[in-house]
């Protein structure tokens, strides 16, 4: 099976987002009780709640420090205290409070849909975002600290230098446990998601004989190859990668929001040059990455087919040995391996192309702050500390804008995994929820079997197997079915057991 990647970029993006929603939304909101826009609104509402909570927490900490140690607070955190006071004394404070109330009200409105422990999933995601916002706030402050530290060093202000250095060290001491806790809760939520999604897929897979209808053992007669891989490896990869990318996007947005204003205040020319440069580089790399998506999709299937061939040998070892089938089995296994290697060679070529393009953009980006800021520094329009702060803010904004570019290979794997897993989920749901055929003419009563005027065809309906069969077997009666090989004895048993419908 080959992924279809030739569609237009917007159509492909729309299809992938639809598949992503089908896989991810049920973990947070039931698909039949909330639309995609409502799911997106709750994500935005979560940001509103987190922003209000972080501001309230920071305000409480600063106010407590001002009460306990006013002199030290003014000395080390005077700028932070002034900024917070400015927020609460302006319309910004009203805005933060209003958005927090709006976000909290949205979750209250969806409280019925957040049952079955879905509220816990949102709570863990909120905790992770709180930690992200905290770390990004510290990073934004480090830019100002680096500016003041550099100026104090250049101007040989020893006392001021060591005071700022202590603040610098305190930032890392505070940020480290927050970042570690963020990783812990991210992995924890990913594991909970994997457990939930795997059990959901297994439940549907074992319902209504979906595992039989999909017929995974016949590779040519099914659209769903290797269901074992899709339930195990694809589910694991999807949950961990999707949450990782979601957190990464949140992180990039927060980093961009907090540092773009700093960069704009220092140099508007540098800001515009960064936007233009990142837009061109991102477009080129995304276009190159589209080819990699299709190759990764194929690689997942080829690897699973190769593994299935080896499992087939293990499960049928006695039969292969009995019939001396080593040579054909060996040839088939080598053929599957050759397919894996050949496709991976194509992946290597495109990985090298993308890596060269990405490294070129990264190296070129290192020169922009110097090219743009050097004239202003030589003319005395900005001091060296401001130059350092601009470089720091530029790097943070550049990293957030290039988040997609830097993850292009992982995104290719992720996109291919989405297509495989969502295709399997949709097929399993379709089969597991299919109603029984009302035309089924097999009547089970009191343990007996009654068949009236039944016609049976092969599953695809191309060949007749049994015509106008009438059969009645009462409870405790026995019937022996005999006939030459290929006359339909096994097909009759399949019809009676309900595997095939007449």
Image: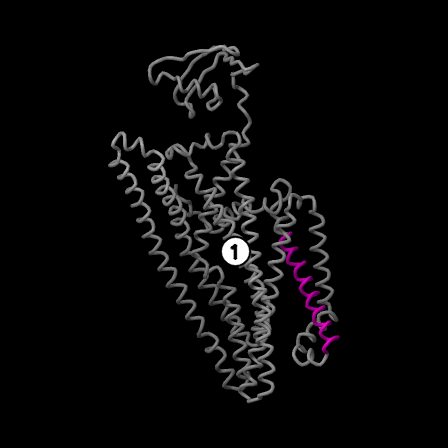
Q: How many marks?
A: 1
Q: Position of residue 85 (x, y in %)?
A: 72, 73
| Dot 1 alpha-carbon crowd within 10 angstroms: few under 14, some 14 to 19, many 20 or more | some
Q: Main secondary structure of the magenta part?
A: helix
| Residue ID at (70%, 76%) | 82
Q: What range is drawn magenta here?
A: 42-69
| Residue ID at (44%, 11%) | 479
Residue that badge 1 annotates:
244
Q: Is residue 482 left or right of residue 30?
A: left
Colour approach in the figure: one colour
| Residue ID at (33%, 56%) | 349
Q: Measured along the vertical axis of the image, is residue 127 above or below residue 343? A: below
Q: Is residue 370 left or right of residue 24?
A: left
Q: Position of residue 258 (x, y in %)?
A: 59, 68
Q: Quadrant of residue 156?
A: bottom right
Q: Measured along the vertical axis of the image, is residue 321 above or below residue 243? A: above
Q: Position of residue 399 (x, y in %)?
A: 50, 66
- Quadrant, the N terminus: top left
Q: Between residues 320 and 140, which one lies in front from this camera angle? A: 320
Q: Between residues 79 and 467, which one lies in front from this camera angle? A: 79
SS class of the residue under badge 1?
Answer: helix
- Can residue 238 be found in the magenta stretch? no
- Can residue 54 be found in the magenta stretch? yes
Q: Position of residue 199 (x, y in %)?
A: 54, 40
């Amino acid at each position: 099976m080959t992924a279809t990647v030739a569609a237009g970029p917007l159509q492909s993006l729309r299809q992938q987002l639809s598949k992503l929603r089908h896989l991810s939304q049920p973990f947070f909101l039931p698909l039949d009780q909330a639309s995609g826009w409502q799911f997106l609104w709750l994500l935005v509402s979560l940001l509103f709640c987190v922003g209000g909570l972080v501001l309230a927490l920071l305000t409480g900490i600063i106010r407590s420090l001002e009460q306990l140690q006013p002199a030290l607070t003014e000395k080390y955190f005077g700028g932070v205290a002034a900024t917070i006071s400015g927020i609460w004394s302006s319309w910004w404070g009203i805005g933060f409070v209003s958005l927090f109330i709006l976000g909290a009200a949205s979750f209250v409105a969806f409280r019925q849909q957040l049952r079955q422990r879905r509220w816990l999933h949102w709570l863990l995601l909120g905790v992770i975002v709180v930690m992200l916002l905290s770390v990004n706030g510290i990073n934004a402050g480090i830019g100002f600290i680096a500016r003041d530290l550099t100026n104090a060093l250049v101007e040989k202000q020893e006392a001021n230098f060591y005071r700022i250095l202590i603040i610098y060290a305190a930032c890392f001491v505070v940020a480290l446990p927050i970042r570690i806790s963020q990783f812990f809760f991210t992995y924890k939520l990913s594991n909970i998601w994997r457990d939930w999604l795997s059990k959901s897929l297994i439940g549907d897979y074992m319902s209504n004989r979906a595992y039989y209808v999909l017929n995974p053992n016949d590779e040519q007669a099914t659209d769903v190859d290797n269901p074992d891989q899709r339930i195990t490896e694809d589910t694991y990869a999807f949950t961990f990668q999707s949450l990782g990318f979601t957190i990464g996007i949140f992180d990039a947005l927060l980093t961009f929001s907090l540092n773009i204003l700093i960069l704009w205040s220092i140099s508007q020319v540098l800001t515009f040059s960064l936007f233009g440069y990142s837009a061109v580089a991102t477009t080129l790399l995304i276009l190159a990455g589209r080819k990699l998506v299709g190759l990764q999709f194929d690689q997942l299937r080829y690897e699973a087919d190769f593994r299935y061939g080896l499992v087939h040998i293990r499960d049928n070892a006695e039969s292969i040995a009995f019939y001396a089938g080593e040579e054909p089995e060996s040839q088939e296994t080598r053929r599957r391996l050759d397919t894996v290697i050949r496709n991976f060679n194509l992946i290597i070529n495109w990985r090298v192309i993308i890596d060269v393009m990405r490294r070129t953009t990264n190296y070129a980006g290192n020169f922009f702050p110097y090219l743009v800021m050097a004239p202003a520094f030589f003319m005395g329009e900005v001091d060296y500390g401001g130059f350092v702060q601009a470089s720091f803010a530029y790097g943070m904004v550049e990293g957030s804008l290039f988040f997609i570019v830097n993850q292009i290979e992982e995104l290719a794997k992720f996109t291919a995994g989405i297509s495989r897993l969502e295709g399997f989920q949709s097929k399993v749901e379709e089969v597991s929820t299919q109603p029984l055929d009302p035309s089924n003419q097999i009547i089970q009563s009191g343990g007996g079997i009654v068949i009236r005027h039944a016609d049976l065809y092969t599953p695809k309906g191309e060949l007749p197997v049994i015509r106008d069969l009438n059969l009645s077997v009462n409870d405790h009666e026995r019937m022996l079915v005999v006939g030459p090989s290929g006359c339909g004895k096994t097909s009759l048993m399949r019809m009676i057991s309900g595997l095939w419908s007449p």
